[in-house]
Amino acid sequence: ARVTSTLALRVERMIKASKKLERAWNRMCVVDLGAEKEPGEVDPACLQRFLFKHDDGSWQDGASPAAAAKAPKLATEKQVAQVKQLQRSGTYWREGWQGLCGEG
């Protein structure tokens, strides 16, 4: 039996709901992992990177494209906590985040 994490299930729902997100997922897998993969086949850190970059909620049912375009792209409290947890987990993640933010 395949065990799938909450993160993998969220990514799976996202890529099924949006062709654009599906293309982004496949592109990330090929670049970072060497081949297209299912969300349940990749490590949680990879799933988190994808969610941080692409999960603005616009893919969910009921969100119109116009509303999604106008919505501020702010991180949720949960996402902020996840980033902080990753930063505390090691130099690799801390420096990676600083690189994305243009710090350091």
Image: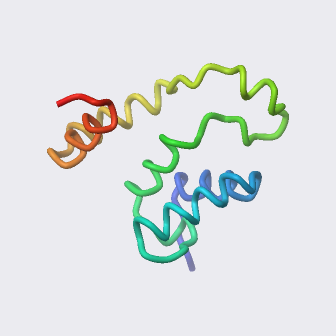
Is residue 10 or residue 69 the one in the foreground? Answer: 69
Question: Looking at the figure, which quarter contains the C terminus?
Answer: top left
The vertical placement of 35 against 46, above or below, is below
Coloration of the structure image: rainbow
The answer to whether 43 is drawn above or below residue 74 in the figure is below
In the image, residue 8 lies at what x, y percent?
Answer: 55, 58
Q: Quadrant of residue 99?
A: top left
Q: Position of residue 72 (x, y in %)?
A: 61, 19
Picture coordinates of residue 73 (x, y %)?
57, 25
Report the number of discs.
0
Identify the residue at horizontal 82%, vertical 40% (top origin). 61
Q: Is residue 63 left or right of residue 44?
A: right
Which residue lies at the image location 45% right of the left edge and 33% below the top edge?
A: 79
Q: Viewer-proximal residue, 6 or 56?
A: 56
Q: Nearer the viewer, residue 14 or 40?
A: 14
Position of 85 relative to 22 (above/below)? above
Q: Position of residue 70 (x, y in %)?
A: 72, 20
Q: Residue at x 38, y 37 (%)?
A: 82
- In the displayed structure image, the side of residue 7 where residue 95 appears, left or right: left
- Please, which residue is most extreme toward the bottom here? 1
Relative to 93, 39 lies left or right: right
Q: Quadrant of the N terminus?
A: bottom right
Q: Which residue is located at x 57 percent, y 59 percent?
A: 25
66 vs 73, left or right, is right
Pick the residue in front: 46 or 96.
96
